[in-house]
């Protein structure tokens, strides 16, 4: 693993990835990388008609995340500046496998492999998950117009997809720790004790490595 911490926060829609990434950034004074969501011109149409707009939506996200990760590698990681991101680029495959047909996914996967072969890989992954009720409540609370047509069934399937992907990831990358937190039990936005617990767990993971100078 690299000497400079690169932490990614992952989990299904509405679980609180951006809020936690920002809190970690503020605590450790790490650079913050936030994924582009609202700027995707296809996303609203996608939630209304997944089959019709899935390929355009996923390609937009892939190309933008490729550019973002290239930029943080150039401007931060290569200069020993730690980064925390509110996504891991493997999420592209989670969403694409769920929404694209077989022919589209085959093409998409080839492009994904080419674009990500030289991308920086995280040193630690924080994985947040929560029940469907919690995800729906949090999506409603943040009130994004673009998310009003998200199907509960789609959210439920997405959570299962994340669990399966993380299980495979942990087997294939035993050198990259995955820190799991339950969003039903922890509300790190409202309860400072819950946030402290997550920060302490992350600190322990960093101290177990060679990055003690970042704590």
Image: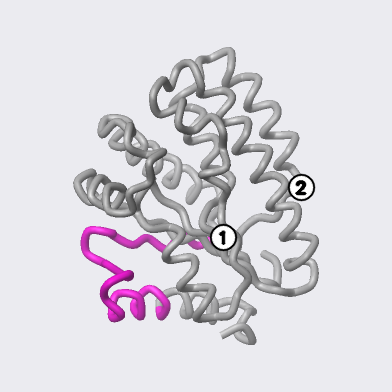
Indicate the secondary structure of the residue bearing disc 2: loop
Q: Residue at left 28%, top 80%?
A: 193
**Is 189 within the magenta?**
yes
- Circle 2 Cα neighbour tier, 10 Å, few/some/many (<14 / 14–19 / ≥20): few
Q: Residue furthest front?
A: 145
Residue 28 % position (x, y): 55, 80
Q: Which mark is residue 199?
A: none
Q: Which residues are magenta?
A: 176-200
Q: Residue at x 44, y 47 (%)?
A: 166
Residue 84 drawn at (x, y percent): 57, 66
Quarter of the figure that contains the N terminus: bottom right
Q: Measured from the top left, where is residue 10 in percent x and y? A: 46, 53
SS at circle 1: strand
Q: Residue furthest top?
A: 103
In the foreground, 172 or 120: 120
Which residue is located at x 56 percent, y 33 percent?
Answer: 41
Instruction: Tell me where residue 74 appears, x and y as whole percent.
Output: 80, 61
Q: Residue at x 63, y 25 (%)?
A: 108
Q: Which residue is mark 2?
A: 118
Q: Is residue 98 above or below residue 19?
A: above
Q: Which part of the image, by quadrant, shows the C terminus?
A: bottom right
Q: Earlier in the sequence, mark 1 or mark 2?
A: 1
Q: Is residue 134 left or right of residue 188?
A: left
Marks 1/2: CA distance?
A: 17 Å
Q: Is residue 63 magenta?
A: no
Which residue carries the number 1 mark? 85
Tell me where residue 48 sits by quadrant: top left
Above or below for 158 versus 74: above
137 to the left or right of 34: left
* Front one among 114 and 149: 149
Number of the front mark, 1 or 2: 1
Q: Is residue 69 above or below residue 79?
A: above
């Amino acid at each position: 693993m690299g000497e400079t911490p690169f932490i990614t926060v992952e989990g299904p829609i509405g679980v609180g990835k951006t809020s936690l990434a920002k809190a970690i950034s503020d605590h450790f004074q790490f650079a913050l990388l936030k994924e582009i969501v609202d700027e995707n011109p296809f996303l609203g149409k996608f939630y209304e008609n997944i089959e019709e707009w899935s390929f355009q939506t996923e390609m937009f996200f892939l190309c933008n995340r490729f550019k973002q990760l290239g930029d943080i590698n150039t401007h931060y990681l290569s200069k020993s500046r730690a980064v925390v991101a509110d996504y891991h680029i493997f999420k592209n495959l989670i969403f694409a496998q769920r929404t694209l047909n077989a022919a589209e996914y085959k093409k998409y996967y080839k492009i994904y492999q080419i674009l990500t072969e030289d991308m920086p890989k995280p040193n630690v992954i924080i994985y947040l998950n929560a029940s469907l009720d919690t995800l729906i409540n949090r999506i409603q609370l943040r009130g994004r117009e673009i998310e009003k047509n998200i199907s509960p069934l789609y959210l439920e399937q997405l959570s299962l997809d994340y669990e399966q992907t993380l299980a495979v990831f942990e087997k294939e990358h035993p050198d990259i720790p995955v820190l799991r937190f339950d969003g039903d039990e922890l509300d790190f936005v409202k309860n400072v004790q819950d946030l402290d617990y997550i920060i302490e767990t992350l600190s322990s993971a960093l101290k177990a490595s060679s990055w003690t100078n970042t704590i």
